[in-house]
Amino acid sequence: MALQSSPFPNGFVAGVHAVGWAFILPCFWFLDRLIAVVKSTTLEQTQRLEQECYLHPLKVFFSSIIFLILFLATAPLALLGFILWAPLQACRRPFYYHRETPSSPEKETHRGFELVGKASFGFATANLCLLPDSLARFNNLGHTQRRAAAIGQHIVHGVCRPHICIFVDSPSSCGTLSPSNSIIPRVNSPTYGATDRQAQPAISNQQGRVGHRSAPRALLSQGLHQQDDIPWEVSSLFPANVDILCLEEVFDKRAAQKLTKALRPVFGHILYDVGVYACQPPCRCSSFKFFNSGLFLASRFPVLEAQYHWFPNGRGEDALAAKGLLSAKVLIGQNQKQKNVVGYFNCTHLHAPEGEGEIRCEQLNMVTKWIGDFQTANKLPDEDVAFDVLCGDFNFDNCSPDDTLEQNHHLFEEYRDPCRAGPGKEKPWVIGTLLEQPTLYEDDINTPENLQRTLEREDLRRQYISPPVAAEGCPLVYPETDQPWIGRRIDYILYRESSISKHCRTEVEEVTFITQLAGLTDHIPVGLRLNVIMDSDGADQ
């Protein structure tokens, strides 16, 4: 059954919901501004010092009084809106679905399997911290709406460039020359405070590609490196031709709409405002959800089926959001035997507080079960499965002693992590993805180019990437002798081969650590490109 664009069963329910939210919004906005006006980011503090602005305390005092009065004045209207809004959540489907109508059906498909029996697929994930502005400031990030618009422009600018690989047959070469570092001209990348000057990128469709060769030999300097048979790079741009994008912490509805508007010319299928609200389960107040899951999925391929589950074991402030798992089945195209080729893509955001690994392990158990149930319910006998990917913010890393329980979870026996050497041990080229929030606007990391240079130097990297978390009662010894300093990598893209068609073979073409969102989020986005080769003889089976 085709996905519905609205989460509500009919226009009347959607209209009543819109009226209820319209009554709530003014009160919510005044409360948001009341908190935001007294909570400054380090960037704003620095700017006030440079401008010798001494009137800020008066501004905070009078603004707080004004917003408090407006908040109290609109509270009765918000209460009425809540009475209309809350009961309707029981009949709400868990996401909005936006679909751009293509000029021709071929633009939504990948013809690689049909023409040459192989194809390349790009995936990316990023935690954006698009909370209401007041809450985002506790992570040293402000101006949520401006950040959302700028992030959308940055992503489109990156993914719409050509995917160029220059191969050199010299025996001494061992990587690929990266277009992000050499060939493709860059738009100037201002710091966060100047995001409104970002130029609108050109939009182009890249679905005509047929597949890409992996990088056994090429230039090493300033580009793609290869180690442990995994090509990787730190790039100041999003990888070209990303097919499916998973974003986390897109909690703010207006920010989600801005992202959708920016991304829809490239990603024609978008699921946003994913999650549940109010009392969950419905009609029982065991848990009240003030925020959705924060998950946001954008795909170039048509979404055939999608399913969302929320974690029932959230605790503390995490229980206020409907974190969970979003699973999607996408139509890629056809193979040489004219059978449909599909892929499975799953994104999640796990429990955040440190020291609560048992909760995260329970959630990983749920994730593996829900993915299995979804694929069993939606798999058809006359189609080929090309990929099965799981990504998101797992909120644990592979180097912290405090995360030992999660590091040994059986999920990693099913899904492959290209950055992982084993439980508790990263591959030596891996880079942590969680930035230290107080230093987000330091000169070394406040632009894509500066952050790229910093991440490539271990002595600088350790100043800005969050260090591992020690186990309770044990001193931290990190890194081990003769091992590099990596830091906390909590953003993952995993892939599974046991669940794809038996005549498909998968190889990793590239892992990318992306710095294009420097100053816009406290995470480093991650990209993965997979090559999938389909045996033409096996397609008959």
Image (cartoon, helix red, strand yellow):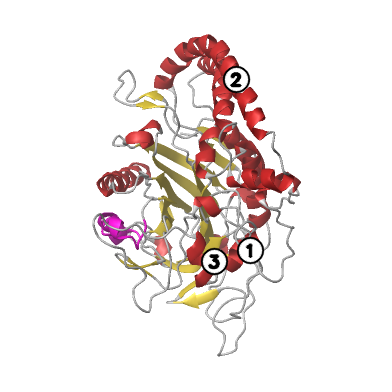
The image shows a total of numbered marks equal to 3
Q: Could you tell me the amino acid type at mark 2?
A: Ile
Q: Earlier in the sequence, mark 3 or mark 2?
A: 2
> Secondary structure under badge 3?
helix
Q: Could you tell me the amino acid type at mark 3?
A: Leu
Where's residue 342, x and y in %?
46, 51
Instruction: Answer above or below: position of 251 versus 180.
Output: above
Q: Nearer the viewer, residue 522 or 509?
A: 522
Residues marked 3 and 2 touching at CB (< 8 Å):
no
* Magenta residue span: 397-415
Q: Nearer the viewer, residue 501 or 274?
A: 274
Is residue 408 in the magenta section? Answer: yes
Q: Say which quarter of the image contains residue 539.
A: bottom left
Task: Quarter of the image for the C terminus: give it.
Answer: bottom left
Q: Nearer the viewer, residue 451 or 163?
A: 451
Q: Nearer the viewer, residue 371 or 135?
A: 135
Where's residue 497, x and y in %?
36, 61
Q: Which residue is mark 1?
A: 450
Q: Which residue is mark 2?
A: 65
Q: Given this view, does label 3 or label 2 mark the residue nearer the observer?
A: 2
Instruction: Answer above or below: position of 56 versus 340.
Output: above
Where's residue 51, x and y in %?
73, 45
Q: Which residue is mark 3?
A: 455
> Secondary structure under badge 1?
helix
Whole-Å distance between the Cαs marked 3 and 2?
A: 44 Å
Q: Earlier in the sequence, mark 3 or mark 1?
A: 1
